[in-house]
């Protein structure tokens, strides 16, 4: 294997590991802020107990997210030094602001929140948690601003073989950012909802102490997760319509659409010959892809072969077709997991409304295992987003093959790939064990007039 393939594998593995933790941090921070706000407005100590219990799990996940995220930035200067040389003027700005402003804000106020129990007033302490949640999600905005430039470059000029920023405001108002960020935020809400509902389901199955705490947590998790899942689906539909305008090859790869169609059929199941760019076997719904794109059952959707010809005329000779099989199946796993999540949440909501959640052991078991569904959807969604953009690392400006370092050899990349993969695997095991351990402990409600035990 060459250095390019190894560098791509390393960055993919590190990113997927990191993204196991990020959505839960984003979504759970807001949910905990809502729980603590409910405690402040109602005075009900059970909401304080809930806040502290889920806050403890949030802190474990946050620490692992930080540990796995630091390594990513070092790779830009090592494995991807040509990318950093070409893009550093633009890519570095939002990443620097993320670290110096949003992450700093999040970390500082998280420390205040941890040590502020019994020292700050309830209202001020809840406000601090909202600042943590805002900081967490501002971090996502800045990181996605950098990623959105890679998807749709704006506000730049090419000078001396480098992309230089000419309009910082254009970077912030990039239309791609404000299509992408709501999708990421909604998926984070769904991830946190399933996490809370799944752990609560485990305690309800075991008839743990303080059952009412987990009844309430289950309801909060289901409603919160349902809001996130519905938003993911709605925003995802808008994102698909936007994708067809700015990256039509990505949509064509997601549907294994080899040739332009009008009306365009949507693939339910396709076995394709990627080398010859043709279907071996396919089940398609006539006109459905046109409806997805144009909200009507007619309209042209360009195919892979025609787009390849267009790109050769625009960018010169080369292969501009992304890995179709990877794009096709990751897109379907993401979408399929999303609709399965919606189905489970609707059944859970029905059980809540009938007040028979505790008497629905099958549903509770399903919700426990379903904690992994949003993680699966998040991971495959990011793999699709990045892989279906290939061969570009910055769409239309720099190819991935031109972005890899000229000085880091294959042996060095292979060594660090093995080390990082094993190290991250250990961190993942530690994270899961810590979350499982503290989730199983449950909560201890304070005696009347006594202070609730601190979660940290």
Image (spheres, rainbow, N blue to C red):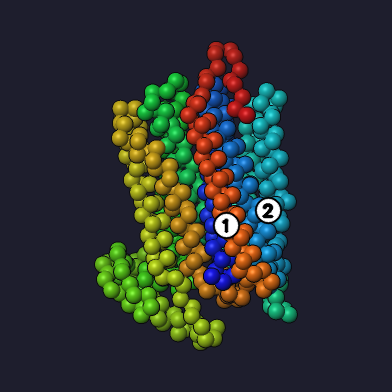
- Residue 132 in sight from this viewpoint: yes
Q: Secondary structure at mark 2?
A: helix
40 lies above or below 267: above
Q: Is residue 389 left or right of residue 337?
A: right
The picture places residue 30, in percent across and down from the top left corner, at 56, 40
63 lies above or below 39: below
Q: Is residue 280 left or right of residue 117?
A: left
Residue at 63% x, 29% y is 456
Q: Quadrant of residue 41?
A: top right
Q: Secondary structure at mark 1?
A: helix
The picture places residue 418, in percent across and down from the top left corner, at 57, 57
Q: Residue furthest top?
A: 448
Q: Is residue 241 left or right of residue 175?
A: left
- Residues packed near mark 1 inside 10 Å, few (<14), some (14 to 19) or many (20 plus): few
Q: Quadrant of residue 296?
A: bottom left
- Residues packed near mark 2 inside 10 Å, few (<14), some (14 to 19) or many (20 plus): many
Q: Nearer the viewer, residue 118 or 84?
A: 84
Residue at 49% x, 41% y is 192
Q: Earlier in the sequence, mark 1 or mark 2?
A: 2
The picture places residue 452, in percent across and down from the top left corner, at 58, 20
Of the 4 image quadrants, the one containing the N terminus is: bottom right
Marker count (numbered): 2
Q: Nearer the viewer, residue 12 or 355?
A: 12
Residue that mark 2 sits on:
98
Q: Quadrant of residue 415?
A: bottom right
Of circles 1 and 2, which is in front?
Answer: 1
Residue that mark 1 sits on:
418
Residue at 70% x, 79% y is 161
Residue at 42% x, 28% y is 203
- Residue 149 in sight from this viewpoint: no
């Amino acid at each position: 294997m060459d250095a390019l393939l190894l560098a791509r594998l390393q960055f993919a593995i590190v990113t997927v590991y990191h993204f196991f933790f990020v959505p839960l941090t984003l979504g759970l921070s807001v949910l905990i802020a809502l729980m603590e706000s409910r405690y402040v407005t109602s005075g009900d100590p059970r909401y304080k107990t809930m806040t502290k219990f889920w806050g403890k799990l949030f802190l474990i996940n946050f620490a692992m997210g930080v540990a796995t995220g630091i390594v990513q930035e070092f790779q830009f200067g090592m494995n991807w030094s040509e990318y950093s040389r070409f893009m550093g003027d633009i890519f570095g700005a939002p990443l620097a602001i993320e670290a110096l402003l949003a992450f700093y804000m999040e970390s500082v106020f998280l420390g205040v929140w941890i040590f502020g129990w019994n020292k700050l007033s309830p209202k001020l302490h809840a406000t601090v948690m909202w600042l943590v949640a805002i900081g967490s999600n501002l971090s996502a905005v800045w990181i996605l601003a950098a990623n959105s430039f890679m998807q749709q470059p704006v506000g730049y000029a090419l000078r001396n073989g480098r992309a230089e920023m000419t309009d910082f405001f254009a970077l912030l108002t990039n239309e791609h950012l404000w299509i992408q960020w709501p999708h990421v935020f909604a998926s984070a809400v769904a991830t946190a909802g399933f996490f809370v509902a799944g752990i609560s389901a485990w305690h309800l199955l075991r008839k743990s102490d303080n059952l009412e705490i987990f009844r309430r947590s289950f309801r909060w998790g289901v409603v919160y997760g349902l809001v996130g899942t519905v938003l993911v689906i709605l925003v995802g539909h808008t994102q698909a319509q936007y994708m067809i305008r700015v990256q039509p090859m990505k949509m064509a790869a997601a549907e294994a659409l080899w040739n332009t169609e009008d009306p365009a059929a949507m693939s339910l199941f396709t076995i394709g010959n990627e080398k010859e760019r043709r279907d071996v076997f396919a089940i398609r719904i006539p006109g459905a892809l046109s409806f997805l794109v144009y909200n009507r059952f007619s309209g042209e959707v360009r195919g892979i072969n025609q787009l390849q010809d267009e790109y050769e005329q625009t960018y010169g000779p080369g292969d501009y077709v992304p890995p179709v099989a990877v794009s096709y199946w990751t897109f379907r796993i993401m979408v399929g997991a999303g609709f399965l999540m919606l189905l489970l949440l609707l059944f859970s909501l029905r059980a809540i409304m009938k007040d028979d959640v505790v008497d629905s052991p099958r549903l509770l078991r399903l919700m426990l295992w379903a904690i992994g569904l949003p993680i699966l959807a998040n991971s495959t969604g990011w793999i699709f987003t990045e892989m279906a953009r290939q061969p570009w690392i910055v769409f239309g400006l720099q190819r991935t093959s031109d972005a890899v370092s000229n000085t880091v050899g294959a042996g060095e990349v292979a060594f660090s790939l093995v080390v990082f993969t094993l190290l991250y695997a250990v961190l993942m095991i530690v994270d899961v064990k810590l979350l499982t351990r503290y989730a199983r402990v449950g909560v201890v409600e304070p005696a009347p007039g006594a202070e609730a035990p601190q979660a940290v």
